[in-house]
Image (cartoon, rainbow, N blue to C red):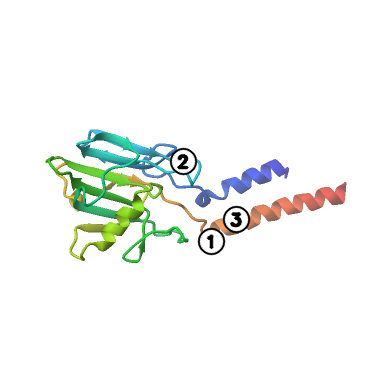
Amino acid sequence: MKPLISLMLLASMLPGVARAQAGGLPAGQSDCLNAANSFVGCIQESPQASTPEPLVTFGSPLGNGVFSTMPLPPTVTLLGAVVLFESKNAVDATTLFFNGIPVSDVAVSFVMPGSPAIGVNLISDGHPDLPAWVAYLNSLPAAAPITVMAETGAYQDVTQALHTPYNVQIASDVEAVPEPTSYSLLGLGLGLLATWVRRQRRDG
């Protein structure tokens, strides 16, 4: 078996190591907001983890689309919030927590002073305002309208949780982790490659 074939076999054995883009998320997009069956805004995945991500908003008096920032409480009045977490989320020094649960992304509905419009923000884990939002949600009483959901990588309906008069769906990518079978297959592929190298040296 030639080394190129061995490496291709190795790559095909590791589907669980790649970043999940399930549920219709466009390629290269990490988070999407679908509102009122008429608007879809997505956050482009940054090639560098250190690059701040924008947020997606709909229904705000400031407009619909992708913004670098939006007003924070108490400038806006919260109507509802959805805290997304990954069931396999890796916890590190930068992880934010809501009631002890590691936070991936947050969706909030709100109104601004002097406007009857109900806005919705999808705030990604790469947005600089996410720590402030998580701190604010943690400061609210237990009866606050906050829903905690495990993200799936597919679109999830959060209309009722956000108390909006229009349909709202959000999708967030999921970091897949290698499963035990993937590790086993990785070992098999490396073993095949090592065997080929030994034979080449012996025959050479």
Mark 3 residue crowding within 10 angstroms, few (<14) / some (14–19) / many (20+): some
Q: Amino acid at mark 1?
A: Pro
User: In the drawing, what numbered circle is on residue 180?
Assistant: 1
Q: Is residue 124 visible?
A: yes
169 sits left or right of 101 in the view: left
83 sits left or right of 15 in the view: left
Chain-order first, disc 1 or disc 2: 2
> How far across and down, in percent of the image, does residue 9 sit?
62, 46
Using the image, determine if residue 178 lies above or below residue 119.
below
Q: Nearer the viewer, mark 1 or mark 2?
A: 2
Seen from the viewer's position, the closer of residues 40 and 72 is 72
Residue drawn at x 74%, y 53% is: 194
User: In the drawing, what numbered circle is on residue 196?
Assistant: none
Using the image, determine if residue 188 lies above or below residue 27.
below
Residue drawn at x 49%, y 55% is: 177
Q: Amino acid at mark 2?
A: Ser
Chain-order first, disc 2 or disc 3: 2
User: Is the N terminus in the top left, top right, bottom left or bottom right quadrant?
Assistant: top right
14 sits left or right of 196 in the view: left
> How far across and down, in percent of the image, does residue 12 sit?
57, 46
Seen from the viewer's position, the closer of residues 103 and 8 is 103
Residue 103, by quadrant, is: bottom left
Question: Which residue is under mark 3?
Answer: 185
Disc 1 versus disc 2: distance between alpha carbons? Answer: 29 Å
Chain-order first, disc 3 or disc 1: 1
Seen from the viewer's position, the closer of residues 189 and 154 is 154
Do callouts 3 and 1 mark residues in contact (Cβ within 8 Å)? no
Do callouts 2 and 3 mark residues in contact (Cβ within 8 Å)? no
Question: Which residue is under mark 2?
Answer: 46
Residue drawn at x 26%, y 48% is: 72
Mark 2 residue crowding within 10 angstroms, few (<14) / some (14–19) / many (20+): some
Q: Amino acid at mark 3?
A: Leu
